[in-house]
């Protein structure tokens, strides 16, 4: 009975937070996208056709704009990531999602659909799941699925861009969410992965040791997560905001399409954006005459990962897993760009 009660409390808090931060605002944004075929200007350059030179001003301006867009979701991500560790019973999670299997990878990916968070805001929850010994495959699928198979974003891009962009996003989003997550998890050693259920009581003998009150454990968990996540998050956003002109040097310039796809695939995988911000960015590139290849590459890599989210995940996952995910996203971005150059 206690297990069911704790799970219900977590689900109620998650649903309330997502309703306020995501579901209700996205409903209005979807209505606007359907009616006006836009969801705003590009966060990358605004209404300008050139990017600002690297400077403290460029870094600060982007950071302010970015955090205004994501701060509610970022707070919610940290809150839910810490609540996962104190409300959801370890034994229940271990039995349900403790194995690195295709089934658990699918469950983790499908569980991400209601979240609709950007990669940075979803990272604390994925970290919390991994710390509760949820399988790496399920945790990573949850993290990658949030930005990539976000149903609201798919609706936005269908009406703002076209159904062809939506199809490309769905195909590559599913490959990354379920395929890359599963393979990345297989790269982990047994010591890195979730412990077997029969060893759970030896590792976490909760019945033999008195626990602190839930509220105290939650504060400790959240404070630890803030220390591990926020500093790298803040600094990397500033660095990326300043380096926009270096990351996207082809903005407003004439360049070979294949070279542009390569540059955009790498830069987009490192750059950080709020949820669905890739849509106005792509829309602005298309208005400047850029082809479907670079646009399709950004469609996949921009939301999938970013330097800040990779640094967050690195606190809980081995470096080889993080590098594999980054390389896979860049590689699939290249493939997406080639497909986009042909069909868009």
Image: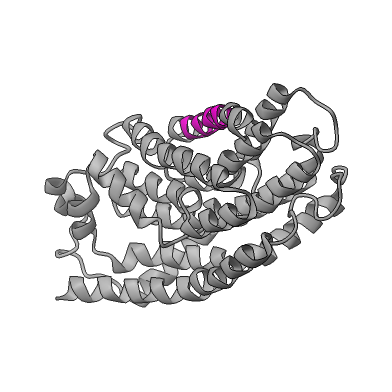
In the rendered structure, which segment of residues is drawn in magenta?
323-336
x and y percentages locating residue 204 in the rendered image: 21, 55
In the drawing, does residue 180 fall left or right of residue 298? left
x and y percentages locating residue 148 in the rendered image: 49, 48
Is 330 rendered above or below residue 235? above
Give the image's coloring scheme. one colour
Magenta-colored stretch includes residue 6: no
Is 121 rendered above or below residue 327? below
Taking the spot 57% from the left edge, 47% from the top edge, the residue there is 303
Magenta-colored stretch includes residue 331: yes
Residue 342 visible to an observer of this rendering: yes
In the drawing, does residue 24 fall left or right of residue 287? left
State which quadrant residue 53 falls in. Answer: top right
x and y percentages locating residue 111 in the rendered image: 34, 56
**In the image shown, does 179 or 341 lie closer to the viewer?**
341
x and y percentages locating residue 221 in the rendered image: 42, 64
Is 223 rendered above or below residue 59? below
Prevailing secondary structure of the magenta residues: helix
In the drawing, does residue 77 fall left or right of residue 140? right
State which quadrant residue 269 falls in. Answer: top right
């Amino acid at each position: 009975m206690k297990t069911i009660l704790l799970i219900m409390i977590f689900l109620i808090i998650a649903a309330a937070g997502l309703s306020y931060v995501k579901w209700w605002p996205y409903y209005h944004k979807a209505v606007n996208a359907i009616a006006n075929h836009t969801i705003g200007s590009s966060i990358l350059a605004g209404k300008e056709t050139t990017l600002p030179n690297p400077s403290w001003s460029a870094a600060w301006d982007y950071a302010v704009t970015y955090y205004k867009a994501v701060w509610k979701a970022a707070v919610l991500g940290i809150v839910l990531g810490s609540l996962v560790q104190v409300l959801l019973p370890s034994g229940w999670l271990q039995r349900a999602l403790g194995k690195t299997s295709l089934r658990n990878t699918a469950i983790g990916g499908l569980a991400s659909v209601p979240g609709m968070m950007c990669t940075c805001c979803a990272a604390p929850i994925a970290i919390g799941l991994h710390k509760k010994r949820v399988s790496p495959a399920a945790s990573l699928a949850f993290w990658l699925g949030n930005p990539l198979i976000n149903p609201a974003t798919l609706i936005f891009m269908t009406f703002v861009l076209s159904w062809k962009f939506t199809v490309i996003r769905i195909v590559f989003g599913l490959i990354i969410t379920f395929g890359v997550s599963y393979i990345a998890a297989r790269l982990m050693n047994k010591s890195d992965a979730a412990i077997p259920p029969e060893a759970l009581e030896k590792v976490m003998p909760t019945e033999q040791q008195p626990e602190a009150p839930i509220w105290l454990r939650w504060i400790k968990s959240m404070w630890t997560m803030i220390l591990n996540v926020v500093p790298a998050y803040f600094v990397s956003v500033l660095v990326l905001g300043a380096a926009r002109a270096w990351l996207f040097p082809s903005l407003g310039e004439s360049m070979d399409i294949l070279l542009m796809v390569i540059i955009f695939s790498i830069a987009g995988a490192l750059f950080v954006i709020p949820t669905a911000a890739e849509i106005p960015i792509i829309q602005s590139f298309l208005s400047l005459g850029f082809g479907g290849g670079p646009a399709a590459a950004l469609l996949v890599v921009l939301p999938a990962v970013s330097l800040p989210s990779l640094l967050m995940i690195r606190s809980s996952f081995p470096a080889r897993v993080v590098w594999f995910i980054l390389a896979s996203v860049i590689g699939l971005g290249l493939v997406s760009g080639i497909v986009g150059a042909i069909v868009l």
